[in-house]
Amino acid sequence: MLATAATVALVALAAAAAWSDLRRRRVSNRLVLLGLGAALAVRAATLDPVTIGLGVAGAAVGLALLLPAFAARWVGGGDVKLLAALGAFLGPSGALLSGLVGIALGGVLAFAMALAGGFGRQVVANLGASITTLTAPLAPRRARAHVVPLAVPLAVGCVAVQLFATGGAL
């Protein structure tokens, strides 16, 4: 019963965050805090300290995974906090796997958006220069319409990992 509640809450958080990011290119703190609270409440309802600890560890892994990218201004703070909240549902290994899947999908989405927006050559040249010089790629400011809604691929990665872990069951 609690596993079903956790999966439903995770899917609801992921869907709401993806929708918000698609519409406004932002994920609200209120939504993320609500999701984190739900994850920790479901885990606390088990009254098992290990289960609660795995939720906290999952949030820490989600936070740690995107924090360096945030420091480099490659992702927004809402994306970092979202992965932390989703990680609280998934635990540390689920947070790591789903975060890596989400980042990979985000890279594909970013490249597709760059091509569609006419920035393809600039992105390829920027990545080539970064590889040649072994430096981080530049991330110039873009108009809001050209900002990658990273919550979408993060949500897809997290829901996929959760459904795989639960055998596709809600």
Image (spheres, rainbow, N blue to C red):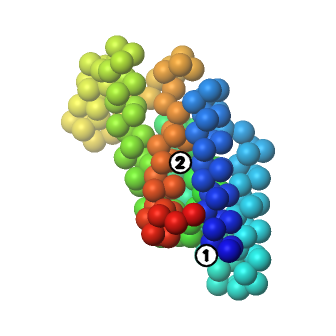
Name the residue located 50 percent from the left edge and 70 percent from the top edge.
Answer: 166
Question: What x and y, as percent, mark residue 71?
Answer: 55, 43
Name the residue located 40 percent from the left edge and 53 percent from the top edge.
Answer: 101
Residue position for label 2: 155
Q: Amino acid at mark 2?
A: Ala
- How far apart are the alpha carbons under marks 2 and 1? 20 Å
Q: Between 6 and 129, which is closer to the camera in this rendering? A: 6
Q: Going by the image, does 146 lie left or right of 35?
A: left
Instruction: Check the image and report above or below for 28 versus 9.
Output: above
The C terminus: image quadrant:
bottom right
**Does the rendering let one see residue 2?**
yes
Q: Amino acid at mark 1?
A: Leu
Question: What x and y, as percent, mark residue 41?
Answer: 77, 68
Question: What x and y, as percent, mark residue 39?
Answer: 70, 64
Q: Going by the image, does 88 lie left or right of 95?
A: right
Query: In terms of sequence position, does the residue under pointer 2 or pointer 1 come before the other?
Result: 1
Q: Between 162 and 150, which is closer to the camera in this rendering? A: 162
The N terminus: image quadrant:
bottom right
Q: Between 69 and 160, which is closer to the camera in this rendering? A: 160
Name the residue located 39 percent from the left edge and 43 percent from the top edge.
Answer: 105
Dot label at residue 106: none
Number of marks in picture: 2
Q: Residues within 10 Å of mark 2 (few under 14, many from 20)?
A: many
Element under disc 2? helix
Instruction: Check the image and report above or below for 154 versus 124.
Output: below
Residue position for label 1: 54
Name the residue located 47 percent from the left edge and 64 percent from the top edge.
Answer: 168
